Image (cartoon, grey):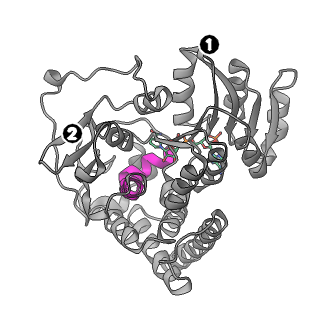
């Protein structure tokens, strides 16, 4: 049977890996929507190749190029944020949420409205609006499947298990590009240094977030929201080989681990074929060749993002939305060369402090609009604080 599929963020790393799997079974899928941002050449090429019904760029100024590139094909085109939401309203059996950042929240939210399956790579959705998103899925009979490799691993380790018997969830982290740098040199880390991930090939933003461990911080919050587990039962551990993606510890002391090559097509394929398991084009792990799997506790002095994630989980309410928004602004500034690597976490912390004086962070986020307003306000405050910091150091 042919399944209909929409991919939000099709031109990115996750989107391209999803299309790679679909390309191997062309008769099994029909593409409804593909979305991208500024990479119009890729978006148009994919829309042509897969005969997409609709191609959307989130940037209205890119629409003329997209229109020209798809002229004469059967693919409709659209541009802008509203077009993204309208695209999410088109029926599809399976939707991939792989836009980067909080921009991915609204399309994913809308895709849930018709009781469909949402494959969730966009971790920011759960960090900013976890309770709201999961409640929406329940209300519409929709299914959310995790695509982050760690959460897919936990999901798989929990098949047939009772959540009541879960004692802890251990999320592994490679430690990123700067894992072994001397602490006192971290402030000098350049964009190129932070982008040199040892194991995973990913988009630029998540690669830098891996080096700062903001990615792991987001994933701790994501674990709490997806699996409904108490924060103190979630443990990060550094595992340089990135072969064990997560472990679930049960009341009897047993640990169920998920192992696999560091290739996102595993988690994407699991969500695409769920509840079946199908052959996937990923390398098989050769344990004898690997010989050693190392684990160690993360150093919170090196990775202050982990402490901040715990504080955010303890606060609840709007803290996740503020944390994520401030992190995105800090990252923008680091990428632009306007902030040092080690200044990102203090900026996020200062934004959380400032926002806690402005709004009651513990209040539940009761609508998508509230989340988006909080996100907007936090971005404004973080940008102001970043500017003040730059002026001080100038
Ligand atoms: N990559 C991984 O291995 C991985 C693993 C786990 C989870 N994730 C999560 O999956 C998501 C995507 O990550 P990625 O690495 O695939 O990112 P990426 O390679 O940077 O791709 C991001 C996608 O979002 C589009 N985009 C950028 N800004 C946008 C905006 N403001 N509005 C709408 N679309 C926008 C991009 O379009 P253009 O490129 O055309 O501009 C691209 O299609 C993130 O939330 C990430 O944390 C990624």
- Which contiguous range is marked in magenta? 204-224
Q: Residue furthest toward the right? A: 72
Query: Which quadrant of the render holds ligand 1?
Result: top right
Of helix, strand and loop, which mostly describes the magenta segment? Answer: helix
* In the image: residue 44, left or right of residue 168: right
Q: Residues within 10 Å of mark 1 (few under 14, many from 20)?
A: few
Q: Residue at x 32, y 42 (%)?
A: 154
Q: Residue at x 32, y 66 (%)?
A: 304
The one nearer the camera, 301 or 355, is 355
Task: Please tell me in which quadrant of the rendered image residue 381 appears.
Answer: bottom right
Task: Please tell me in which quadrant of the rendered image residue 167 appears.
Answer: bottom left
Q: Residue at x 86, y 25 (%)?
A: 71
Q: Is 218 inside the magenta-drawn segment?
A: yes
Residue 83 is situated, as x and y percent measured from the top left of the image, at: 78, 46
Query: Label 1 near label 2: C-beta < 8 Å?
Result: no
Q: Which mark is residue 155?
A: none
* In the image: residue 35, left or right of residue 68: left
Whether 279 is drawn above or below 183: the answer is above
Q: Is 14 inside the magenta-drawn segment?
A: no
Residue 346 is situated, as x and y percent measured from the top left of the image, at: 41, 72
Q: Which mark is residue 256?
A: 2
Mark closer to the chain start, 2 or 1: 1
Residue 272 is situated, as x and y percent measured from the top left of the image, at: 50, 28
Any atom of ligand 1 within 8 Å of the CB at mark 2? no
In the rendered image, is residue 255 in sight?
Answer: yes
Residue at label 1? Answer: 27
The one nearer the camera, 259 or 69, is 259
Whether 173 is drawn above or below 363: the answer is above
Q: Residue at x 39, y 22 (%)?
A: 277
In the rendered image, is residue 120 in sight?
Answer: no
């Amino acid at each position: 049977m042919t399944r209909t599929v929409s991919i939000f963020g099709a031109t990115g790393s996750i989107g391209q890996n999803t299309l790679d799997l679909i390309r191997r079974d062309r008769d099994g899928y029909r593409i409804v929507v593909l979305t991208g941002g500024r990479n119009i050449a890729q978006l148009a090429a994919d829309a042509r190749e897969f005969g997409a019904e609709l191609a959307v760029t989130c940037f209205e100024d890119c629409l003329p190029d997209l229109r020209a590139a798809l002229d004469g094909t059967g693919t409709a085109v659209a541009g802008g944020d509203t077009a993204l939401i309208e695209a999410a309203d088109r029926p599809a059996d399976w939707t991939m949420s792989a836009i980067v950042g909080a921009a991915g929240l609204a399309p994913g939210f809308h895709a849930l409205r018709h009781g469909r399956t949402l494959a969730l790579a966009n971790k920011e959705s759960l960090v900013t609006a976890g309770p709201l998103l999961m409640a929406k899925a329940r209300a519409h009979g929709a299914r959310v499947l995790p695509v982050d490799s760690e959460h897919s691993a936990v999901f798989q380790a929990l098949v047939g298990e009772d959540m009541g018997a879960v004692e802890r969830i251990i999320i592994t982290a490679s430690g990123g590009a700067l894992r072994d740098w001397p602490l006192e040199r971290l402030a000098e880390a350049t964009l190129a240094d932070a982008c040199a991930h040892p194991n995973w090939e990913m988009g630029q933003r998540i690669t830098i977030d891996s080096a700062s461990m903001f990615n792991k911080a987001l994933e701790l919050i994501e674990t709490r929201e997806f699996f409904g587990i108490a924060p103190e039962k979630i443990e990060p551990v550094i595992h340089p080989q990135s072969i064990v993606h997560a472990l679930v510890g049960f009341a009897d002391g047993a640990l169920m681990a998920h192992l696999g090559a560091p290739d996102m097509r595993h988690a994407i394929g699991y969500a695409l074929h769920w509840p079946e398991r199908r052959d996937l084009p990923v390398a098989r792990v050769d344990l004898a060749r690997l010989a050693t799997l190392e684990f160690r506790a993360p150093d919170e002095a090196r990775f202050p993002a982990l402490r901040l994630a715990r504080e955010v989980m303890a606060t609840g309410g709007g803290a996740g939305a503020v944390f994520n928004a401030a992190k995105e602004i800090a990252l923008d500034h680091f990428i632009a060369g306007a902030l040092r690597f080690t200044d990102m976490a203090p900026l996020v912390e200062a934004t959380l402090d400032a926002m806690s004086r402005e709004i009651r962070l513990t209040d539940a986020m009761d609508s998508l609009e509230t989340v988006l307003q909080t996100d907007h306000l936090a971005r404004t405050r973080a940008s102001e604080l970043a500017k003040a910091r730059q002026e001080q150091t100038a």
